[in-house]
Amino acid sequence: MAVDIKNLNHNQLNDLISKAQVRQQELRKEKVAKLREKIHALIKAEGYAFEDIFGHGRSGKPRRTGGTVAPKYRNPANPEQTWSGRGKRPRWFNDALKAGKKEKDLAI
């Protein structure tokens, strides 16, 4: 399929270019999918899992889930209020420091 680009006006040429770029991306995606299938087939034929070869996720190690952290500090005025020492300091912690207490005084 030969296209005579000398006879195309500006808009027709831009349309042809955009269609060609879309087709180029489609071909690339098809090629990547075929390559991915070949790699998975090869790994499976050797008796391994994908994770054995490439690890978990992008970083190569399993992702940590956000677990709870044990509290490190307790409000002496209200023992129900605790803070793990991570993130923004709670108001009661800042107030206690301003009142002259030290961090070790508030530690659990």
Image (cartoon, rainbow, N blue to C red):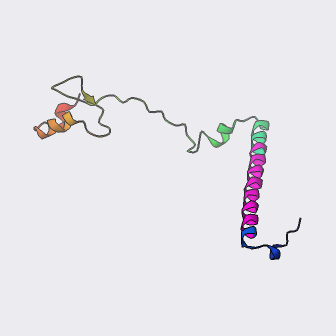
Image height check: is 48 above or below 26?
A: above
Identify the residue at horizontal 75%, vertical 34% (top origin).
47
Q: Nearer the viewer, residue 9 or 97?
A: 9
Identify the residue at horizontal 77%, vertical 54% (top origin).
27
Is residue 24 covered in magenta? yes
Q: Nearer the viewer, residue 34 or 108?
A: 34
Q: Which image quarter is the C terminus in?
A: top left
The residue range painted magenta reads 13-37
Image height check: is 104 above or below 32?
A: above
Counting every numbered tag in the picture gives 0
Q: Which residue is at the far right?
A: 1
Image height check: is 102 above or below 4?
A: above
Place residue 22 in its image quadrant: bottom right
Q: Nearer the viewer, residue 98 or 105?
A: 98
x, y percent for residue 67: 42, 30
Identify the residue at horizontal 58%, vertical 43% (top origin).
60
x, y percent for residue 71: 30, 29
